[in-house]
C-alpha cells in the first residue's frame, strides 16, 4: 500500500521551500523597477499557501517513506514544481499559453535550456532571474537539498536521494545521507559563487554575472542575452565558462575529494579520465577543420571548438558559434555529442559517461569471453568489479533510451516536422541539452512548435532528467499493487 498522506506532507514542504526560492527575483524586480514584482509576489503567496495547507493537513505519524513512495515523490514533485514554477510567467503575461509557460518552466527545472522566447532581452528582470533560478534549483536536484533539511521535520530522505541522484550510482561522501546532501550542496553553492565572481571581474554586469553563474553550474544554458555567450567576445569570460561547465559536468564526489586534496581519489575515477580525455581529444581534433572553414585565428577556432564540445557534452547548451554552419560532417559530430552527457553525480543530463564506459568495456570483454568461453572475465570500473545486475540495468537503460529517441522522432515527424528537426528536438530534449540540429540549431528556438509538440517535448525533458526509470516505473501495473 502506498502512503499517500506521507507524500502529501512532503509535497507541502517542497512547495513552501520552492516559494521561498522565488524571493530573490522580487529583489531584482524592485531594483530595476521592471514592474514584475507583483507577479512574483502573487506566485510566491499562492505556492506557499498551497504548500502550507498540504503540510499541515497530514500528521507526522502518517510518514512512512519506502522505495515506492520515494519514486512517486520525486516524479510528483517535479510535476508540481513545473506547475507552480510557471505562475510568474503566466501572471506577468510573459507567456499567454499553457504550452509555452510549461515548456519554459520544465526546460529550466530539467536544465535543458531550450526556449520558446524570441527576444530574451525584453523580459522583465525579475522574471528573467526566476528563469535562471529554475535551472539552479534543478541542477543538483531540489530533492538532494531537501534530504539535508527534512530530518529537521522528522522526514527521512534516503529513498528520495536514491530516486533523485543523477546517474546509475550515488556515491556517498558520508555514511549519513543528510551529510552527503549538505556537502554536495556546499560544493555546488561555492562553485556558483566563484563562477559569478569571475564573470563579474571579466566584465559582465552584476546581474548578468549572477544569472550566468546560476545556469553554468546547473549545466542549464539559459542566458540573459539573445546571442547567449556569443554576446561576450571576451576570451576571459568564455574560458571561465568552459572551466565551470567542465566542472559542473564532473561527478561532484570527485570534485569534493579534489578540493580536499585527495587527488588519488580523483585519478582513481575511470569515468573522470574518460570524460576529460574525450572532451580534450575532440576539441583538438575538431579545431583544425573549424579553423579551416571559419577563416579565423586558430586561437578563436580552438576556443569556439572547446566551448561547443564542453557545452554539448555537459548538456549546458551555451553557444558562441553556429556549429551547423561549418560542414555537414561536423554538424553530425556535434549532433553525436547530444548522446554523451557528463559524469554520473554531476548536474549534467544525458546518458552519462559511466554508462558509455561500462558498455564499451563490456563489449570489448565479450570478444575475450568468446575466445575463452570458460574464463571468468570480470568487468571493473574504478578497480571495483561491476555486478551483472548493474550491467543489465545499464544495457536496459541504453536500449530504452534509444527506443524512446526513435519513437519520439517518429511522433514529431507525424506531427509534420522534417526529419532533421524531429531528430534534433527529441535528442536535445531527452538529453537535456538545448541546441541541436535542423530548425532547432544553436541560433534557433522552439517557439514555432505547436502546443501538443511542446507538451510532448516537455515530457521528454522530464523523462531524461529523471533517468527514464523514475518516470516509466509509474506506468507499470506492479508498481501500484499492494505487495
Image (cartoon, grey):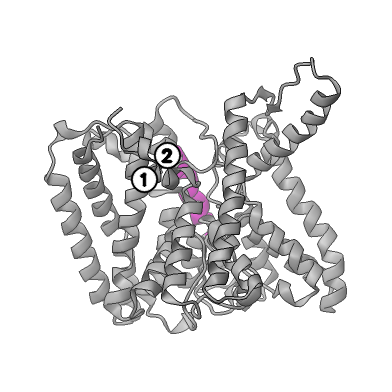
The local secondary structure at tag 2 comes to helix
Total number of numbered discs in the rendering: 2
Marks 1 and 2 in Cβ contact (< 8 Å): yes
Q: Determine which of the numbered discs, if any, sits on residue 194 in the image.
A: none
Instruction: Label 1, secondary structure: give it.
Output: helix
Q: Which residues are magenta?
A: 181-195
Q: In which quadrant of the rendered image does the C terminus lie?
A: top left
Q: Residue 365, percent across and down?
A: 78, 29
Question: Which residue: 32% across, 50% down?
Answer: 76
* Badge 1: residue crowd in 10 Å (few <14, some 14–19, many ≥20): many
The reply to whether residue 232 is in sight is no
Q: Earlier in the sequence, mark 1 or mark 2?
A: 1
Left or right, 318 with reference to 86:
right
Q: Is residue 463 left or right of residue 126?
A: right
Indicate yes or no whether the magenta region holds residue 189: yes
Residue 42 in the figure: left or right of residue 160: left
Q: Nearer the viewer, residue 61 or 451?
A: 451
- Magenta span: predominant SS is helix
Q: Who's the residue at 38% across and 76% down the image? A: 125
Which residue position holds label 1?
A: 74
- Give above or below for 321 relative to 140: below
Residue 185 sits in quarter = top left
Observer-nearest residue: 222 or 163?
Answer: 163
Residue 313 rendering spot, x and y as whole percentages: 66, 55
Position of 148 relative to 92 (above/below): above
Q: Is residue 397 above or below residue 238?
A: above
Residue marked by disc 2: 163
Which residue is pictured at 25% across the width and 42% down the height?
A: 7
Residue 459 x/y as whole percent? 44, 59
Amino acid at each position: 500500500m502506498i502512503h499517500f498522506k506521507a507524500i502529501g506532507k512532503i509535497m507541502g514542504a517542497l512547495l513552501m521551500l520552492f516559494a521561498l526560492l522565488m524571493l530573490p527575483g522580487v529583489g531584482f524586480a524592485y531594483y530595476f523597477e521592471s514592474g514584475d514584482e507583483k507577479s512574483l509576489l502573487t506566485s510566491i503567496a499562492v505556492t506557499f499557501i498551497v504548500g502550507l495547507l498540504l503540510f499541515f493537513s497530514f500528521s507526522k505519524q502518517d510518514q512512512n517513506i519506502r522505495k515506492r513512495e520515494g519514486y512517486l515523490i520525486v516524479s510528483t514533485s517535479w510535476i508540481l514544481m513545473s506547475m507552480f514554477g510557471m505562475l510568474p510567467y503566466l501572471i506577468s503575461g510573459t507567456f499567454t499559453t499553457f504550452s509555452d509557460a510549461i515548456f519554459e518552466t520544465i526546460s529550466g527545472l530539467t536544465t535543458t535550456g531550450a526556449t520558446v522566447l524570441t527576444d530574451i532581452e525584453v523580459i522583465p528582470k525579475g522574471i528573467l532571474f526566476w528563469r535562471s533560478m529554475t535551472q539552479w534549483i534543478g541542477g543538483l536536484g531540489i530533492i538532494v537539498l531537501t534530504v539535508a533539511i527534512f530530518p529537521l521535520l522528522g522526514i527521512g530522505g534516503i529513498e528520495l536521494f536514491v530516486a533523485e541522484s543523477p546517474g546509475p550510482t550515488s556515491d556517498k561522501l558520508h555514511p549519513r545521507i543528510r551529510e552527503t546532501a549538505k556537502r554536495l550542496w556546499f560544493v555546488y553553492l561555492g562553485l556558483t559563487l566563484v563562477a559569478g565572481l569571475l564573470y563579474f571581474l571579466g566584465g559582465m554586469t552584476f546581474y548578468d554575472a549572477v544569472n550566468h553563474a546560476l545556469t553554468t553550474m546547473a549545466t542549464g544554458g539559459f542566458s540573459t542575452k539573445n546571442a547567449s555567450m556569443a554576446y561576450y567576445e571576451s576570451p576571459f569570460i568564455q574560458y571561465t565558462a568552459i572551466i565551470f561547465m567542465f566542472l559542473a559536468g564532473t561527478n561532484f564526489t570527485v570534485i569534493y575529494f579534489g578540493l580536499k586534496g585527495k587527488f588519488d581519489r580523483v585519478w582513481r575515477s575511470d569515468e573522470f579520465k574518460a570524460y576529460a580525455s574525450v572532451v580534450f581529444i575532440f576539441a583538438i581534433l575538431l579545431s583544425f577543420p573549424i579553423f579551416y572553414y571559419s577563416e579565423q585565428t586558430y586561437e578563436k577556432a580552438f576556443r569556439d571548438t572547446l566551448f561547443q564540445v564542453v557545452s554539448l557534452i555537459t548538456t549546458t547548451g551555451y553557444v558562441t558559434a553556429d556549429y551547423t554552419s561549418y560542414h555537414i560532417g561536423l554538424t553530425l559530430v556535434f549532433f553525436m555529442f547530444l548522446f554523451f552527457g557528463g559524469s554520473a553525480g554531476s548536474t549534467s543530463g544525458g546518458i552519462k559517461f559511466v554508462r558509455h564506459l561500462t558498455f564499451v568495456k563490456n563489449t570489448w570483454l565479450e570478444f575475450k569471453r568468446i575466445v575463452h568461453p570458460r574464463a571468468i572475465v570480470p568487468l571493473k570500473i574504478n578497480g571495483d568489479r561491476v555486478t551483472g545486475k548493474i550491467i543489465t540495468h545499464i544495457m536496459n537503460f541504453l536500449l530504452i533510451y534509444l527506443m524512446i529517441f526513435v519513437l519520439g522522432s517518429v511522433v514529431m515527424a507525424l506531427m509534420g516536422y522534417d526529419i532533421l528537426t524531429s531528430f534534433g528536438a527529441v535528442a536535445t530534449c531527452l538529453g537535456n541539452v538545448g541546441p541541436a540540429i535542423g530548425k532547432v540549431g544553436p541560433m534557433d528556438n522552439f517557439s514555432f512548435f505547436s502546443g501538443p509538440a511542446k507538451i510532448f517535448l516537455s515530457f521528454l525533458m522530464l523523462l531524461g532528467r529523471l533517468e527514464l526509470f523514475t518516470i516509466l516505473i509509474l506506468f507499470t501495473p506492479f508498481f501500484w499493487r499492494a505487495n
